[in-house]
Image (tube, rainbow, N blue to C red):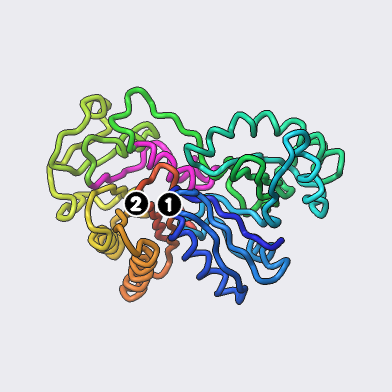
Amino acid sequence: MINLFLFCRAGYEKECAAEIQDRAAQLNIGGFVKTNTNDAYVIFQCFNEGDADILAQKIALDSLIFARQMFAAKALLKDLPESDRATPIVEALADVSKAGELRVETPDTNEAKERSNFCRKFTVPLRQALKKSGSLLAKENPKRPIIHVCFVASGMAYVGYSLSQNSSPHFMGIPRLKIAPNAPSRSTLKLDEAFGHFIPKEEQETRLRSGMNAVDLGACPGGWTYQLVRRGMFVAAVDNGPMDEGLMETGQVKHYQADGFRFEPPRKNIHWLVCDMVEKPSRVAELIEAWAINGWFKEAIFNLKLPMKSRYKEVSVILSTLSEILHENEVNDFTLACKHLYHDRDEVTVHLCLRPNGPW
């Protein structure tokens, strides 16, 4: 494969492009990016055939901040005939053998969404054709590669594959979450998605269990507190503003009317610290650093609001500085991950886990 195709949020193509250029350079793989503002995808075209396969294997998707999904792709297929789009796609995928799943997708833009009905209908005949050619197994297999066919315009598609162990489980990397009717705000989906993204499904029963103690800094009106409460946790909600009455009636929330930057937990048996304050990202990072150095939590999820320019650079500097400061203060056993999640807008979500090997 010659291209690496990366899905991202519309408007964040430059950030996604800068990141993949850095990561490819670290692997000594040459190439250049092709993208347009608000296309919601980036193409990294390698100089050498086969290098995209190396990138798809060696770059962990979860280690990329701005990419939702990625796959190794052929050159763009153009002028696919309306009478038979399947045949040239099957021919282009001739060297892909025994894949376990097919995804016919579009970028996440309003214009592209108009092609979603076509993609759903086209999936059926294309799946049959790929099974007949041997590129796709007769039954889905989650351990085998995933075939991607992404229509970027009418009659134009990138085709390729991703590795099942290094791929988002969701179409286009977008989880489909529904907001609960009694949730205080739509921001609740950000923490719901973050838990699903950062905490492996098989570990959620132990790391997100009922009875844990949590702190929500900047909690008002309670969107993030809601996600903690619905999982059975007891929450110290810190905010000068009012909290949702329904949350307070659960008996699981204690409201501290205080400044989140000055609050110190009265008890130090906190597992989860969460924070979604509208503040400078460097200031929020410094706050989390202080809590981590004091050992006031085991895991934290917090958002960093992004500037208008140099967003990838600023996030990279903040994360690097956070790691350095923790090491300087002898906090060495931790993991740090960052992602521009689907329900984020001009922000990224960070997960910091102290003592990542438990016990929880």
Q: Residue at x 31, y 49 (%)?
A: 273
As drawn, the label of residue 340 is: 1
- Residues drawn in magenta: 188-217
Amino acid bearing label 2: Glu
Q: Residue at x 77, y 32 (%)?
A: 125
Q: Is residue 9 magenta?
A: no
Q: Position of residue 230 (x, y in %)?
A: 37, 31
Answer few, some or many: residues within 10 Å of disc 1's Cα (few below 14, many 20 plus, some between 14 and 19). Answer: many
Report the magenta stretch's main SS: helix
Q: Position of residue 232 (x, y in %)?
A: 37, 33
Q: Which residue is mark 2?
A: 347
Residue 248's image quarter? top left
Residue 236's image quarter? top left
Q: Secondary structure at mark 1?
A: loop
Q: Position of residue 247 (x, y in %)?
A: 26, 29
Q: Give 302 or 251, whichever is nearer the viewer.
A: 302
Answer few, some or many: residues within 10 Å of disc 2's Cα (few below 14, many 20 plus, some between 14 and 19). Answer: many
Residue furthest to the top: 181
Q: Residue at x 71, y 46 (%)?
A: 147
